[in-house]
Amino acid sequence: RRNYQQALNINIEYGDRYSQAGTYQNLGYVALELREYEEARRNYQQALNIFIEYGDRYSQAGTYHHLGIVAQNLREYEEARRNYQQALNIN
């Protein structure tokens, strides 16, 4: 987590917005593995916003999928379904 956070700080410092998305995605993975679901959601949402900004549909699909996993773990089943459906609609 420390390394990803350091990478994110550098991406922000240099204005590399697209790389920030990948780093937020990785921070989301770490939080998900640690079962820190709200933290994971925040990071995935940040990544998703950037992928939308850049029109990266493929990465959006993967991020929606991970947001679905987070919602499912939180037993927010309708939210999980919406996110999984978003991912399917892109693929």
Image: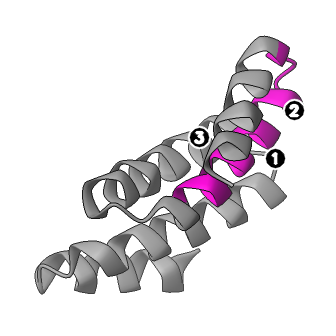
Q: Position of residue 43 (x, y in %)?
A: 50, 52
Above or below 18: residue 61: above
Q: Nearer the viewer, mark 2 or mark 1?
A: 2
| Residue range (magenta) | 60-77
Quarter of the image where one finds residue 73: top right
Residue 70 or residue 60, whichever sits in front: 60
Q: Quadrant of residue 36?
A: top right
- Residue 9: percent from left, percent from top: 27, 77
Q: Is residue 1 above or below residue 27?
A: below
Q: Nearer the viewer, residue 13 or 59?
A: 59
Left or right: residue 46 compared with residue 41: left
CA gap, disc 2 to disc 1? 9 Å
The C terminus appears in which quarter of the rendering? bottom right
Task: Decide whether residue 81 is among the magenta residues.
Answer: no
Determine which residue is flagged by label 2. 73
- Predominant secondary structure, magenta span: helix
Q: Which corner quadrant holds the N terminus? A: bottom right
Q: What label sits on residue 35 in the rendered view?
A: 1
- For image coordinates 71% across by 19% down, the residue present is 79
Question: Is disc 3 in contact with disc 1, using a CB cutoff of under 8 Å?
Answer: no
Say which residue appears at 48% left-offset and 75% top-offset. 22
